[in-house]
Amino acid sequence: MATPKEWTKSGWKKHTALQQPNWPDRKKLDKVIGNLALLPPLVFAGEIRVLKEMLAKASKGEAFLLQGGDCSENFSQVTAPNIRETLKVLLQMAVVLTYAGGKPVIKVGRIAGQFAKPRSSETELVDGVELPSYRGDMVNKIEPTIEDRTPNPKFMLKGYYMAASTLNLLRAFTRGGYAALDRVQAWNQEFVVQSPMGRSYDRLAKQIDTAIKFMNTIGIPTDIPQVNQTQFFTSHEALLLNYEEALTRIDTITGDWYDCSAHMLWIGERTRQVDGAHVAFLKGVLNPVGVKIGPDYDLDNVKQLIEALNPENEAGRLTLITRMGVDNIEKVLAPLLRETKKEGYHIVWSCDPMHANTYTSASGHKTRDFNNILKEITRFFEIHRVEGTIPGGIHLEMTGKNVTECVGGARNIVSEELHSRYDTTCDPRLNAEQSLEVAFQIADMIK
């Protein structure tokens, strides 16, 4: 695939752009965007091409996509311990999926850029006062005052530096020995070690450690990148188009355009209009692109999206992230799979079991039931097997912290416990133990 000749990185402005902040000062916005455009890229075209090649394998069932992280990152949470704990759980999950599931795992974080969020309304009531909606730390602050809620483009510049520092630490961890396979037991956090999932992981880690020792004993070298390092990629929803445009650069090797804010970008359910600005923008960048598809999709519209975003039917270019809900998936996923299979589209099918399973608990907290999350994943795999298509990935909102935001799981968190460690400013996330439990369940399905 090549960038369309008629495409320009600012061409999206000719289309309707939904979910954009109402920036009060256009001159200040233009100045910030101009500064962003001069800053170094956050990721590189070569890395993006490597991810696309790996996703092409996932579309054929030769690899599996693990994509996870915060619903919405907060500037205050961009700390070394938080970044390390999120990475650690994703590494643990990947080890389970690779070793127990028998497939290479593509590790993609919702990290280093997931600072903006779509909202259903421009304003919201807070203690009876109507304020601009909180749209994520890259746009405004969550504090309920007019001053804090007024969109400020300078926060996009801060978001860039936060993403850069996150990426710097991720690269250090994944290439500096932290991600080495002989550390798989060291990744087990104390509160996970003491749980059923932690004990299962510990058994698996000991098997890997034994295998590495055996390799050393018989003279097979283990001081190699495949053992000592890991490939880790970043992703976020390409929501703020001014920011994405500023970080879109021409690759000097190929002459093509890449959005260098992240390795992979996705378009949300609210902004995937075929003639909209988000699709117009992502048509021209050669990153892998994801599209969220909910239960109320229109089949012809989805086909138009596929044709628009991947006109050459390139394997690895397009991931469809289905977010159907446990009550809908059995009746709505199969027709979509049948039609795309008939058309011969190369697609990575990924399951987001989080978004359509959200509800308000008796305690008043927005939450998700762990059992419903597992059920949707299970049905996702079963339907693909029946239809002869490939379940290629999973897309989770999760954290490395010991939060209580989703009910259920091995510790059986109940509604009355949600308040104790409910830290999210957006949607409820799986904690480390629940995430690991999901990985063990998926490993069995992959096999």
Image (cartoon, rainbow, N blue to C red):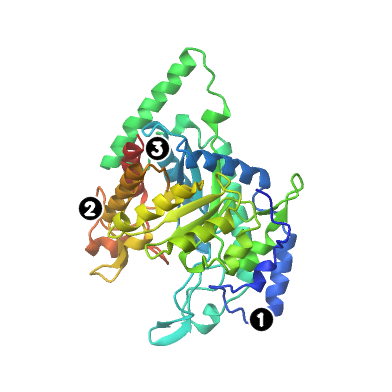
| Front residue (pair 326, 147) | 326
Q: Quadrant of the C terminus?
A: top left
Q: Which badge, 2 or 1, comes first in the chain's sequence? A: 1
The image quarter in which residue 152 lies: bottom right
Disc number lying in front (3 or 1):
3
The amino acid at mark 1 is Asp
Q: Which residue is mark 1?
A: 25
The image position of residue 216, as x and y in percent, is 49, 17
Disc 3 residue type?
Leu
* Gap between marks 2 and 3 measured at Cα: 23 Å
- Residue displayed at 37% across by 55% down: 335
Q: Classify 349 as above or below 230.
A: below
Q: Is residue 147 above or below residue 401?
A: below
Name the spot of residue 284 as percent of width and height, x first. 66, 57
Residue 190: image quadrant is: top left
The residue sitting at 74% across, 67% down in the picture is 34
Marks 2 and 3: which is nearer the front?
A: 3
Instruction: Return the residue at label 2.
Output: 412
Label disc, if present, on residue 271 of the rendered structure = none
- Label 2: which secondary element: loop
Q: Report if residue 160 is visible in the image.
A: yes
Q: Name the residue tied to disc 3.
A: 97
CB under 8 Å between discs 2 and 1: no
User: Against 224, is 415 above or below?
Assistant: below
